[in-house]
Image: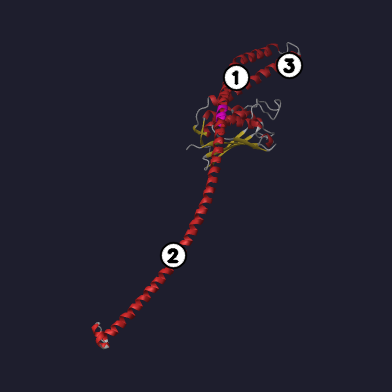
Amino acid sequence: MGSRQWLRELGWTTGTNMNAMISDSSEEKVQLGDVQRALLNILEDSDAEKLRLEVTLKAMINILSDSSEEKVRLDEVQRALLNILDDFNIEQDKLKERTSELQTAIGEMTRSNKELQQFAYVCSHDLQEPLRAVVGFLQLLDRRYRGKLDEKADQWITHSVEGANRMQVLITDLLTLSRVESLGIAPRPTEASEALKEAQENLSTLIAESNAVITIKGNLPKVMADRTQLMQLFQNLIANAIKFRGLEEPRVEISATFDSEANQWLFAVRDNGIGFDMEHAQRIFTIFQRLHTRTEYAGTGIGLAICKKIVERLGERIWAESQLGKGATFFFTLSAPK
């Protein structure tokens, strides 16, 4: 059989069928090349993915390592915080104990102060009557027998009368001091000018005898105070200025300036008296503390202590500034009505 016939029996034709077969073979070869390239790409991608996985694993290992170290640090911080809390609780217990002790001490001090105030009031009040009797009889003795006995007896009678009079003034001042708390009323809007006017009326004799000049600079405001005690405050400060006057006639100037931030008035009582050394600026407000002898200047040493108690009862401040021989200025604050 010839070759052409054999090919026709296989179903192939010459020319066209052979060309088709060659064409199919070429396309298959191309497809195989594509598959090969795809596999190579997959392998490359697989290697890249493997690399990324390795990097990710290393990162996770580092994170876990850091996490372990962080956990250790957190444990240390936690233990430190617990220690701090323990110390805080201990200190808090100590603070509560001290606060309790302080409250107990404050309570005892408050009771003691009340008892002392009551004692001072009772003593000064109950001593008034017998003391008046003593003074009365001593004055009667002085009038009836002065000059009829020897000179020494006259001196004794004089000293007795003077001592009894001083005791009477002292008891009266102590009674006034004890009443600052017991008789003081709650602060209310009060015209300072009216309280000052009343104080001047009470001191009219002293002002006239000393030729004192009282000057009010500007208008005095309305303040939160107990009117009676505000009058007493002005009265004591003016009397103090007149008492400790120098060679010139006493001049007293009273003024008030407003502090808007603090909502309070600053009062100033200035005089041209003998003044004092600033090292005594606190001492002059202490009861029974005197800078001069009784022969130089009369008094009990209670007047400025009363001023201090009146002002501090209102939650305010009082102080003084001076220069020896150049007068003094007494300052005190009072709140303005809201």
Q: Percent position (x, y) of residue 250? A: 65, 34
Left or right of 316, for residue 246? right
- SS assignment at label 2: helix
Q: Residue at x 61, y 34 (%)?
A: 213
For mark 3, what is the residue?
Answer: 155
For the residues labelled 3 and 2, the Cα–Cα distance comes to 125 Å
Quarter of the picture containing the N terminus is bottom left
Going by the numbered disc 1, the residue's amino acid type is Ser
Going by the numbered disc 3, the residue's amino acid type is Gln
Q: Residue at x 50, y 55 (%)?
A: 63
From the viewer's side, name the closer residue of 86 and 241.
Answer: 86
By secondary structure, the bulk of the magenta-drawn segment is best described as helix
Q: Percent position (x, y) of residue 166? A: 66, 21
How is this picture coloured?
secondary structure
Q: Tell me which segment is drawn in magenta.
A: 99-105
Discs 1/2, front: 2
For the residues labelled 1 and 2, the Cα–Cα distance comes to 105 Å
- SS assignment at label 1: helix
- Pointer 3 or 1: first along the chain: 1
What is the number of the mark on residue 49?
Answer: 2
Going by the numbered disc 2, the residue's amino acid type is Glu
- Pointer 3 or 2: first along the chain: 2
The answer to whether any part of residue 200 appears in the image is no
Residue 139 picture quarter: top right
Discs 3/1, front: 1
Q: Residues within 10 Å of mark 1 (few under 14, many from 20)?
A: many
- SS assignment at label 3: helix
Q: Percent position (x, y) of residue 310? A: 56, 30
For mark 1, what is the residue?
Answer: 124
